[in-house]
Image: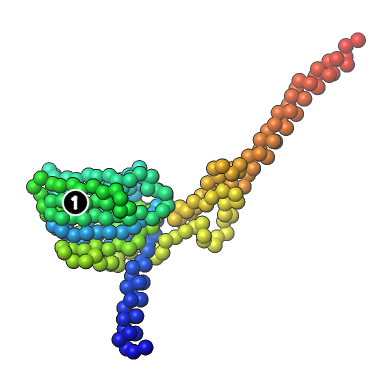
Amino acid sequence: MDIYTRFALYISLLVWNASSETLTFLGNSMAKYPKWNAIEKGTLNFQFKTSEKQGVLLYMQGDTNKISLQLSLELGRLKLAISFSLEENIEEELGRDLHDSTWHNVTIERNHRATLFELDGTQRVVTKLHWKESLAITSDLYVGRMERMYGQSGFLGCIKDLKYSEGYTDLVLHSPIYKSRNIVNYCENYCHKNTTKPQCSKGACVNKFKDYSCDCFGTGYEGKYCNKSKFFKTTVTVLKFIVFIIESVLLPLSIARLQIP
């Protein structure tokens, strides 16, 4: 293998490692990325998965919060809110039940007065403004939460392959310039994690990214770990009822009959 082939292989490995970057956010985690300079034109793309209905995915702003771009989950739907000024705003929603713990692909594309908002390659909306073109963002790109949350929830789940372009350039994968300590550098899955906690006995494990729960639906079992039989519980209840009838009704009747002269 000559030096040029080795160099090409090294570069390809670097690209592969970068493209596979995945982070787990725990609701109070935050990562900060270099500014997405999409004043007039640019594209941003990433993937996420979560089990929660609420949470801030991305946020950035201008000199004041009157100019901002925010992407968040609200009641299981994906909401894009862009403020160009007090008078000119965009709010669009896509999808439903996106808290299904599966990967979803998101694209935001700015093209002068038009903004494209796309989810999973099929659902899309294009909004055109009447007069405002530029989005004068000056801050870094915040992921997972904002510095000031204003009562909103942080994101709990995984985000991967965050890339964006500026102007007419190609999409470039970016790495965070800051990460809070509680960010996990892979997609956490408590259903596959070795733990001292008992796993779901009969039901399906649901990954909560910092814990897990058990879905007992349709199994005939219940309890936190789906390890308590509904049939056994029903049987015990029926037996208790039979004993009650015998002790409170049948037995007194039998005694009364024996006492009749």
Q: Position of residue 235 (x, y in %)?
A: 69, 36
Q: How many marks?
A: 1
Q: Position of residue 116 (x, y in %)?
A: 21, 51
Q: Amino acid at mark 1?
A: Thr
Q: Which quarter of the picture shows residue 251?
A: top right
Q: Position of residue 174 (x, y in %)?
A: 28, 66
Name the residue: 32% across, 88% down. 3
The residue at which mark 1 appears reads as 115
Check the image and report above or below for 51 versus 13: above
Local crowd size for mark 1, using a 10 Å CA cut-off: few (<14), some (14–19), many (≥20)? many
The N terminus is located in which quarter?
bottom left
Q: Viewed as shown, does residue 180 lie left or right of 209?
A: left
Q: Position of residue 55 (x, y in %)?
A: 34, 49
Name the residue: 51% across, 49% down. 213
Q: Answer whether residue 153 is visible to the viewer in this image.
A: no
Q: Answer whether residue 207 is visible to the viewer in this image.
A: yes
Q: Viewed as shown, does residue 165 lie left or right of 7?
A: left
Residue closest to the eye, 46 or 86 = 46
Residue occupying the far right of the picture: 261
The C terminus is located in which quarter?
top right
Check the image and report above or below for 13 versus 63: below
Name the colour scheme. rainbow
Q: Which quarter of the picture shows residue 232?
A: top right
Name the residue: 24% across, 54% down. 108
Name the residue: 24% across, 45% down. 92
Instruction: Identify the secondary structure beneath mark 1.
Output: strand
